Amino acid sequence: MMARPADQTMVLNFGKFLLVFVLLLSWPIVESQSLLNVTEIRSARALDIMLQDYAYRAFVTPRTGVSFDGSVPKNLTGIRVSALRLRSGSLFKRGFSMYKEFNISRGVIEQPYVERLVLVYQNLGNWSKTYYPLPGYMYLAPMLGLLAYDASDLLAKNLPELDIFASGEPILIDFGKVKLGPDGSTAKCVWVDLDGQVNFTNVVSGNKCFAFRQGHFSIVVNSTTSLVPASPLPKSPVPAVVLNPNHKGGGVDSTVWVIVGSVVGGCLLLVLLALLVLWVRGYKKRKKMHKMERTAERGEPLHMTTIGGMKAPAAMVTRTQPTLETEYAP
């Protein structure tokens, strides 16, 4: 028997809620700082618009899956830009290995969906601090940008960015050779999203960072706060919890919070699964009751008659008439 539309909607909504909750549990914890000021955001966004135009100009003879390096005007010497056109389905199924410093994993989704997209690569070089000033921090690597655009018109300008999201493994950024920071300092991965929000995560293997969304990325070090000697950098494949960079000696606290967060998240997940099981059982019971009611409604109705102060079923027609035995007597 088919479930009613209302029941199907409830099942879908509960499934979506459970999926979102699981994704939130697996999402890497980052530390967010204040936004860049309005002037800095406008300057950086104006640069993105300009570099999108110069990147698209590199598609003289466009080929899917091949990166093309663009040229920038002389007043921006030191900035490098490149463009890579890909099919959305291919990017999701296979990813793209080492597009410049970016190793794009499988499972990347873009919103809104387009058949083909262009990934614009930026290397701001010595302009990193000019367009993305981070007071109190020193750049150990240039600011790298990865932005996605619609590829339906390769002559278009001033295109809005697509929102890309790594639904599987994160995007790996290998910065290669990075500068050395001051003694006792700890390097951090920095990610600046398109709204100017600054986020920090831990560096992996000394020169690598993870990313789940587009934006601008680099490796920096706190240049204003004296820190205790840094412990060896983590080598786990996922970013660890990051404390406030001004907090001293927080390594043990970070580990404790990771454990506590994992235990609490696991308990909440088990509670949700238990609620789901109970809800499914109740749904099956209601479904069985509805079936029995419909079966009863389809049966042959009985004629009711009133006898005294109560109602009782009564036959409409007598099948055989009673006869006296004496009628057949000789």
Image (cartoon, rainbow, N blue to C red):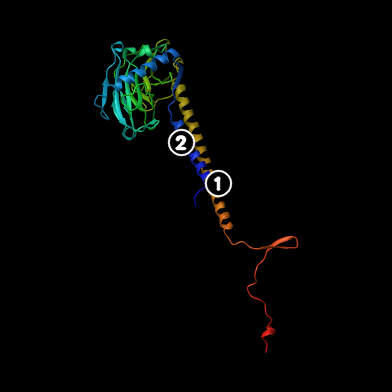
Asked if residue 243 shows in the view, the reply is no
How would you rate the neighbour count of disc 1 (Cα within 10 Å): few for under 14, some for 14-19, many for 20 or more?
Answer: few
Determine whether 258 is above or below 186 in the image.
Answer: below
Q: Gap between marks 1 and 2, in whole Å?
A: 21 Å
- Looking at the rendered structure, the secondary structure element under dot 2 is helix
Count every numbered label the image shows and give the total.
2
Question: Which residue position is annotated with label 2?
Answer: 19
Foreground of the two, 174 or 114: 114
What is the residue that sits farthest to the right in this orientation? 308
What percent of the width, then of the height, locates residue 306?
72, 62
Name the image quarter holding residue 118.
Answer: top left
The residue positioned farthest toward the bottom in the image shown: 330
Can residue 137 be seen here? yes
* Horizontal arrangement in the rendering, residue 117 relative to residue 4 (left or right): left
Q: Which residue is mark 1?
A: 282
Q: Secondary structure at mark 1?
A: helix
Identify residue type, mark 1. Gly
Reply above or below: 115 against 47: below
